[in-house]
Image: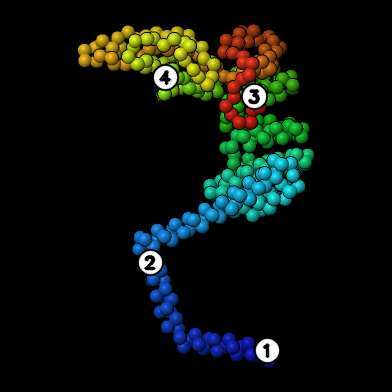
Amino acid sequence: MGHAGAKGRLAQVRHALGRHERTLAAAYLAIVVGVLLLWLVPGVRTLVSDQARKATNWSDRQWVARVDTGVALLDAGRLDEAEAALASLDRRLPARHIKHGLASERTRILEGLARTYWAQDRKRKTLETLRRLTTFEPRGFAFHVLHAEAAASFGELDEARQARAQVLAIQPNHLATVRAVVRDYADRGDAAGAVDAYEAYLDAYGVAQLFLRGDALPVYVRTDARAHDFELPVGDGSAVPRPEEFSSLAPLEVLGIQPEAAFEAGKPGREGAPVRVLVLLSAFKPVDAELWAMVQRACRNLTAWERLERLEARTRVEAVPRDPFAGDPT
């Protein structure tokens, strides 16, 4: 009886729809046309767009707050709670590619999970998570640094070497990674590899900001520890800049300053016009005593005295080397 009754009610619904088919179609078309007309009205379109954007922003803020909570648990050392929170977010966060608006939260989740597993000494989960992280954001050199450090701590030396290679492919001036690569070559008895890695660091493109005191605009100088010359404006030409007037993010050695006499000043109608000077200088990469000692030892093992002399001319050892890149404790 129940089945027959259901069939009867379904037949009644179909009959009613058939009787009012034209009315329903007209109502549907009226709704569609009304929505389109409203959308074409600038004020309505703007209002709808604003509401949609506010809803999206609110949702994004909720995800950020949840990730903040998970990371805070990790920072507080509450590893089990941090793992549960971050693993849940890893499953639920909608960001599945790097161009998603919440991609940075995905990287925070994966980095947090990896650090949580690492603190728990869970090798497989740590390295699996770091592989996911570096695959999701392959250009984030700090993530490759973390991958290399974790892999090395677990004795996975081949994986650590591959991760360091990725770091230097993105940022060849990362001092901590350069030091680790040179040390790895030295530990394996590969003196040539150690020297090659150090020279590649010196040759890698990098710039330092060079300021003349009182001048807000910097000049960018190559930091390959070779002498480069360039022209620099020096105001009205009343004073030639002295070496101590220069400051930089990297150690600088001013090899010479040669004013170009009457380059602008002295011409009719150009009273007080700026002059320029020719500056010849070298800028050096950050190098610490430990790194330089390994390179010296490698050169001696190779009896590469001329090469050692060339590298020494391009090296200035700093007691506390400056490294502007994250992930380097120095």
Is 123 positioned to the left or the right of 38 in the image? right
Q: Are marks 2 and 3 in contact (CB under 8 Å)?
A: no
Q: Amino acid at mark 4?
A: Gly
Q: Position of residue 288 (x, y in %)?
A: 64, 17
Specify the quadrant of the image occupied by residue 237.
Answer: top left
Residue in the image at 59% along x and 53% along y: 62
For mark 2, what is the residue?
Answer: 38
Q: How many marks?
A: 4
For mark 3, what is the residue?
Answer: 330
Q: CA distance from mark 2 to mark 1?
A: 47 Å
For mark 1, what is the residue?
Answer: 2
For mark 4, what is the residue?
Answer: 214
Q: Position of residue 173 (x, y in %)?
A: 58, 25
Which element is circle 3 on?
loop
Q: Amino acid at mark 3?
A: Thr
Residue in the foreground of this view, choosing between 263 and 144: 263
Q: Amino acid at mark 2?
A: Leu
Residue at the bottom extreme of this rendering? 1
Q: Position of residue 226 (x, y in %)?
A: 51, 14
Asked if 127 appears above or below 168 in the picture, the reply is: below
Q: Residues within 10 Å of mark 1 (few under 14, many from 20)?
A: few
| Dot 1 or dot 4, earlier in sequence | 1
Q: Are marks 3 and 1 in contact (CB under 8 Å)?
A: no
Is 265 positioned to the left or the right of 166 in the image? left
Q: Position of residue 229 (x, y in %)?
A: 43, 14
Is 44 positioned to the left or the right of 121 in the image? left
